[in-house]
Amino acid sequence: MGSEAPIQILLVSYPAQGHINPLLRLAKCLAAKGSSVIFITTEFAGKNMRTVNNITDKSTTSIGDGSLTFHFFDDGLPEDDPIRPSLSGYSEQLELVGRKFLSELIQNHAESNKPISCIINNPFLPWVCDVATEHDIPSALLWIQSAAVFVAYYNYFHKLVRFPTDSEPYIDVQLNSSFALKYNEIPDFLHPYSKYPFLATLILEQFKNLSKVFCVLVDTYEELEHDFIEYVSEKSILMRPIGPLFNNPKIKDASDIRGDFVKRDDCNIVEWLNTKPKGSVVYISFGTIVYLPQEQVDEIAYGLLDSRVSFLWVLKPPPKEVGRKPHVLPVGFLEETSGRGKVVKWGPQEEVLSNSSVGCFLTHCGWNSSMETLTLGVPVLTFPAWGDQVTNAKFLVDVFGVGSRLGYSQIEDKLVTRDEVKKCLLEAMAGEKAEEFKKNAIKWKKAAEVAVATGGSSDRNLDEFMEDIKKHGSV
Ligand code: UDX
């Protein structure tokens, strides 16, 4: 490094686990490349993050040639405020408080001669780039879903292709000139039957503001999603794939800086996995937001009992504020599966998927989980609930070739029976199909390693992004 002052970058995250994880990983990558990074989210999330992980508010940690500081702000609501679980009400409140907080922070930095060079946000905070524009600071978006899903929203927003409507609910949707999705494979917030239309509105707000960001960073890699990255670039949007962020070798030393909201179960998960034969365990997790109906949990439990496979199952209790009942396992389930199965509330997913005993991931197909499993070479059984998960499941099965379908999206409202669970589990763990899935998964793992290694496509994109920020600063 030369003697020039490090560039200061603000990263602003929506306070949800699936949003914080990729943005925090990006924060560490940018710091490792020499920037001073300030990671911002709400105090409500920050309180959990500090309790569970070894992080503190406003103290600075060195990472590589740069540094990372956390800054949590009060969202102005009491912990049990009834607005909190309402996405629309909460988003309005967050914008109100967040705009003011961010503006003051930028002002303070300018006054203390440490001007902010760039601001990056993740989805659900479309107003961040307005604040950046008001202060004449370049801003970028970290898109935390796939490039293909970005294309779906882009096409919808600009009305470039036909999408299902009330009168034509079952039509296919063209993503680019050579690839179409069926009506039940599109991000289902865009379908007229979606139970969560507000989520489409919230995501599309970002597309309204797209001309204000100079770059869209994506947690994917060129080799995985070339055609969709190219499609976006043809629309004159600078899209830079920089993933898989979690597996970037430059941030290995900072692996203890994490944003988990839930404490890992203290039951030696990795040690237990180490006692199991290679490829013998199925790992089951539905991410941080999806809650299955109790009767679906029952069917999965009986499928596990009947198949007799070894398993590690993350069954997390619902957050207090959503007021749901925790799941109950069938009587005698834990005793009958003792030794071959483990049920936990939260685990170290990256370490779990890296463990050679794990042969398959039964996943809800959130994009973080999808990237983690693809780039650690673990085949999948897909069980999406809604949104982009439905599209990710399609890609994992039919495009990337790393697994088969098990569950249906919530719109389809179908129960997967214990017999289906048993059959799919047994097929996924051994046999010809399982070998094919593993072979493909290893191919994507190797491609991902090359992408994030020094000089690889994602590494170069991150370097070029930093260069772009410096250029903006010097004009
Ligand atoms: C949300 C949306 O639901 C998803 O559709 C979108 O793609 C991203 O935002 P979420 O449901 O939380 O994400 O799932 P996912 O994207 O898979 O993120 C979950 C994260 O939690 C992963 O990084 C995973 O490693 C981590 N995790 C999960 C753990 O560390 N431990 C666990 O026990 C479970």
Image (cartoon, grey):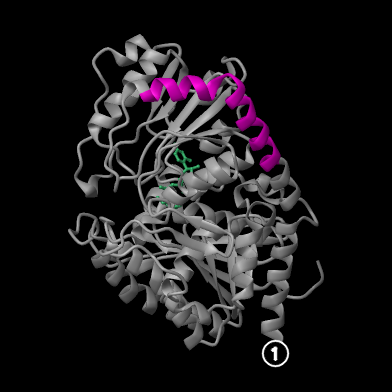
The range drawn in magenta is: 420-445
The image shows residue 318 at horizontal and vertical percentages of 28, 41
Image quadrant where one finds the C terminus? bottom right
Q: Please indicate, yes or no, whether residue 58 appears anywhere in the rendered image.
A: no
Q: Which of the 4 image quadrants contains residue 355?
A: top right
Residue 84 sits inside the magenta stretch: no
In the rendered structure, the answer to whether residue 29 lies left or right of residue 169 reads: right
Q: Please indicate, yes or no, whether residue 307 appears anywhere in the rendered image.
A: yes
Query: Going 45% across and 81% down the picture, which residue do you hit?
Result: 131
Query: Going 69% across and 70% down the picture, which residue do you hit?
Result: 466
Amino acid tagged 1: Val
Query: Going 49% across and 46% down the picture, which residue do you hit?
Result: 394
Residue 430 sits inside the magenta stretch: yes
Pick the front one: 426 or 98: 426
In the rendered structure, the answer to whether residue 470 lies left or right of residue 38 reads: right
| Principal secondary structure, stretch drawn in magenta | helix
The image shows residue 456 at horizontal and vertical percentages of 77, 55
Pick the front one: 77 or 284: 284
Q: Which of the 4 image quadrants contains residue 239?
A: bottom right
Count the marks. 1
Secondary structure at badge 1 equals loop
Local crowd size for mark 1, using a 10 Å CA cut-off: few (<14), some (14–19), many (≥20) = few
The image shows residue 312 at horizontal and vertical percentages of 45, 25
Pick the front one: 458 or 265: 458
> Ligand 1 closer than 8 Å to the CB at disc 1?
no
Position of 186 relative to 134 (above/below)? above
In the rendered structure, the answer to whether residue 289 lies left or right of residue 5 reads: left
Pick the front one: 294 or 132: 294
Query: Going 37% across and 32% down the picture, which residue do you hit?
Result: 345
The image shows residue 440 at horizontal and vertical percentages of 66, 36
Position of 151 relative to 98 (above/below)? above
The residue singled out by tag 1 in the image is: 475
